[in-house]
Amino acid sequence: CYYDGDIPLCSTSTKVLLAPATLGKLLSELNLKALIQQEGCILILSGGTGYSTALLGEMGINCVMVENQHHLAAQAQEGLKSYPSVTVYPLSAKDEPLFPSASFDVIVVDGGAVQVIPQYYLGYLKSSGYM
């Protein structure tokens, strides 16, 4: 069975698992081959249960996923623990992650639930990076 629609991840927010076609389009825009060759790193905001992160981790891409809903972050940590190139951080909405500046080649907003992207995240992009 195939369903090409967003799947709600919890009843208390607008966070979703992106529709397969939407996620496929997003991933196709990331220039994954270059990221793999250059051992680049992707920051995934609002990663939910970690499905898109798992797809990237399966390709060996270095990923850091942040999630502010702790039950979803716990699911992601459990599901992604076999991916050595993936790290999951459960954060509260007020936490500012402590990554070094210019750490990431790409920042991806996953799950459709981010209203405003905090400005400090932009400082985590490398000069050649994109969001």
Image (cartoon, rainbow, N blue to C red):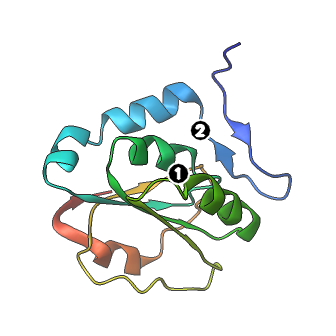
**Residue drawn at 46 percent across, 40 percent down:** 55
Is label 2 in contact with label 1 (beta carbons under 8 Å)?
yes
**Residue pointed to by mark 2:** 18
Q: Quadrant of the N terminus?
A: top right
Choose top left, top right, bottom left or bottom right for residue 77: bottom right
Q: Position of residue 111 (x, y in %)?
A: 59, 49
Image vertical order of residue 35 relative to residue 18, above or below: below
Mark 1 residue type: Asp
**Residue drawn at 25 percent across, 41 percent down:** 32
Q: Is residue 114 left or right of residue 12?
A: left
**Residue pointed to by mark 1:** 110
Cα distance between the residues tagged 2 and 1: 7 Å
Q: Residues within 10 Å of mark 2 (few under 14, many from 20)?
A: many
- Say which of 60 and 119 sits in front: 60
Q: State the SS at label 1.
A: loop
Mark 2 residue type: Leu
